[in-house]
Image (spheres, rainbow, N blue to C red):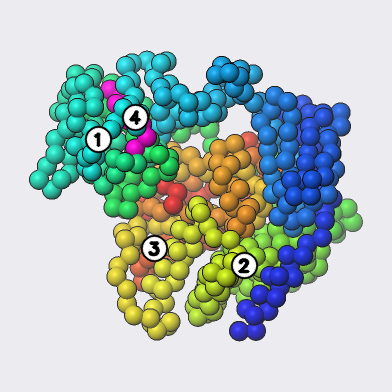
Amino acid sequence: MRLLYFAGVFILFSGMAYGQNQIKGRVTDGKLALSNVQIANLTTGSKTASDTEGRYRIMAKPREELQYTHMGMDTITIIVEDVTRILNVKMNIKVEELAGVEVISEVGRNKQRILQQQYPNNDKLIRTAFGIIDAETFPSRLPVLTSKDMISNHYHFGMFLRGKFAGLNVVIYRNMEFDVFSRGLGSVRAKKPAIYDIDGQIFTQGPSWLDPSTVERVALMPGLIGASKYGSIADGGVVVVNTKNGTYKSKDYKPFDQAKLRNNFVKEGQVKERIDAQTLPVYLEQLYQSESAATAKNIYSKMKGTYGNHPYFLLDSYTYFYEERGEEDFAEEILERFINVTDKNPVMLKALAYTLESEERYEKAHEIYKKVYSLRPDYAQSFIDMANSYRNLDQPKSATTLYARHAYLQDEGMLPVDSMELGMIMKREIKNLFTLENSTLKIKDRKKDKEAKYAARLVFEWNDSEAEFDLQFVNPSNQYFNWKHTLAEMPERIRSEKKLGYSMADFMLDDELPGIWKVNATYHGNKQLTPSYLKVTIYRNYGSKLQSKEIKVYRLGTKGANRHLFDFTLPSPMAQSK
C-alpha cells in the first residue's frame, strides 16, 4: 500500500509536466457567432482571434488560463484541463461604467447581473434570498442602512438594531436571545416577530450570534411585502442583513428551509418525468425499441462500424446490455473495448466508474478509479474517489491513508489549499469515516458531531468539470429550491473547482418535514457540446451506525429540459448546500 502512495508523489510531479494541447472551438452570444473575439493564453502570452464564424485555435497546457474578450461583452477566463481540446464559449452582454453613469446594453433578463455590478457603489441596493432589490424602485418603503450609518459599540446584534429604524421594537430576553417587531411598518400581524435574511439564508430566530462589526447593510422589509416574497413566516416583516464578506454561515443556528419560501410551487407540466425516446441518440433509440436481445445485438453490430470508437456509444451500449438485457458476457466485451478506447481519458473513465458503482461492481470500479488517480494525482477529487472506493471494498484504513496523504501534500505545498467549499466536503467525508469505522481504525470515540441530527445527505458528482446544470429540490409541499451550477451564477466556485480539481457538491437534510421529496435537474451543456454524467449518492440515517447509501447515475444530454431524477422518502426539510 505504501508503494502506491509514494509512487503517487512521483506521478504528481511527473504528471505536471504537461505538453501543450491545441484548443479549438466557437464563440457565440448564445445564438449568433462572434467574430474578432480576442483569445489570449494568460500564461504564455500567445493570442489569436475568432473568425467570421466565431471559430478559433490556440495552444495551451493544462492549468494555463485562456481569456476571451470582445467589445460590449463580459470577459471570460477558463482554466485548461488535461482533457481540454474543445471550448465552445458563450459570451454575455456587458454593463460598463462611464464617469459614474451606467451604460446598459441590454435590459430585462440581465437585470440581476447589472444590479450585482452596481452593488458596491449603490447604497440603495440590498441582497436577499431572491436576488438584489433596489430600494428606489421597491413597491413599498424599504429603509436601507449601510455600515457608515450604523456606528455602534454594541457586541449584541439585538442591541445594535435598537434605534436604527423608526417603528422598530427590539425585545431582548434574559438568555440574550431577542425578537424584532416592526409595528407601524405595514406588518400583517404586529405581534408576530420578524424573520432574518442573512446573506440569502433565512433564520426565524434573532441572530444573537451575529457580530455587528461584520454587518455591511441592513434593510427592514414590511410584513405585507415580506409575506408576498417569503410566505406567511414573514408576516411580521423581514430584517435583511448583508455581511461584509457576503457569505455568513452560523455555526450554532440552522437556516430556515428556502424551499418553503414565497410562491415557489412546481406547476404541472414543468418537469419531464422521463426523457423522450426521440431525444436520445439514434443508436440508443433503436436499442430500446428492439424486441429481443438478439435483435439488439444485431443493431449494435451494425452501429459499431460507425460509432465503434466513440466512448459515449460504447458506454451507453454497455449499460443497455448489462442493465436492461442482462447480457453480462456481451456487455463485458463492450466494456473492455470502452476501456481500451478511453484509457487516457479521465472524464470518460469517471463516467464508467460511476456506472459500475451504481451496479455495485465495486472491485471493477476501483480499478477504474486507480486509472483516474494515476492520470490526475493532483486532483482533490481523485483522493476522494479513491477513498470512497476503498470504503466500498471495506478497506477503511486505506481510505484514511489517502486523506492523510492529501493533507501531507497540502502541508508541503505540493497541492493547493481550499478557500471555498472543498475543505468542508472533505472534512465531512473524514468525520463520517471516523464515526463509522472508529473500532476498525482503533481511534477513540469522539464527541457527537453536530451533523448527526441530519437524516440524509445527498452527494452529487459530475464527470466533466465543464458541465453546467441546475438542481431542483422539491419538498413534500411541492415547493422548490434551486441550486445553479453555471458559470454565470457561481463563477468563483467553478474557478475553485478547476484550480483544486473537484466536481462535487453535497446537501444535508434534516428531519423536520417528512414525506416524499423530488430531485430534478436541468442540463445546460458543457463546452464540448457532449453529454455529461451525474452521480448521486443518497445517504440515509447519515452519520449513524444505521447509515446506508444508494448510488444512482444519470446521463445528462438533453439541454434545457427540467428532468425528474429521483424521489426519496426521508424526513428532510432543508435543501441547503454545504
- Dot 3 alpha-carbon crowd within 10 angstroms: few under 14, some 14 to 19, many 20 or more: many
In the image, residue 123 sits, relative to residue 66, either above or below, namely above
| Cα gap from disc 1 to disc 4, whole angstroms | 10 Å
- Dot 2 alpha-carbon crowd within 10 angstroms: few under 14, some 14 to 19, many 20 or more: some
Helix, strand or loop at label 1? It is: loop
Helix, strand or loop at label 4? It is: helix
> Disc 3 vs disc 4: Cβ atoms closer than 8 Å?
no
Marker disc for residue 414: 2
Q: Which residue is at a point 32% across and 77% down the rendered structure image?
A: 445
Amino acid type shown at disc 4: Lys
In the picture, the quarter occupied by the N terminus is bottom right
Residue 88 appears at what percent x and percent y?
76, 40
According to the picture, the residue beneath numbered tag 3 turns out to be 542
**What secondary structure prevails in the magenta region?**
strand
Q: Earlier in the sequence, mark 3 or mark 4?
A: 4
Q: Which residue is at a point 33% across and 20% down the rendered structure image?
A: 142
In the image, residue 223 sits, relative to residue 44, either above or below, namely above
Viewer-closest of 144 and 295:
144
Helix, strand or loop at label 2? It is: loop
| Cα gap from disc 3 to disc 4, whole angstroms | 45 Å
Q: Earlier in the sequence, mark 3 or mark 2?
A: 2
Amino acid type shown at disc 2: Met
| 3 or 2: mark nearer the eye | 2
Dividing the picture into quadrants, the one containing residue 383 is: bottom right
Q: Earlier in the sequence, mark 4 or mark 2?
A: 4
Q: Which residue is at a point 54% across and 73% down the rendered structure image?
A: 408
| Cα gap from disc 4 to disc 2, whole angstroms | 43 Å
Marker disc for residue 148: 4
- Dot 4 alpha-carbon crowd within 10 angstroms: few under 14, some 14 to 19, many 20 or more: few
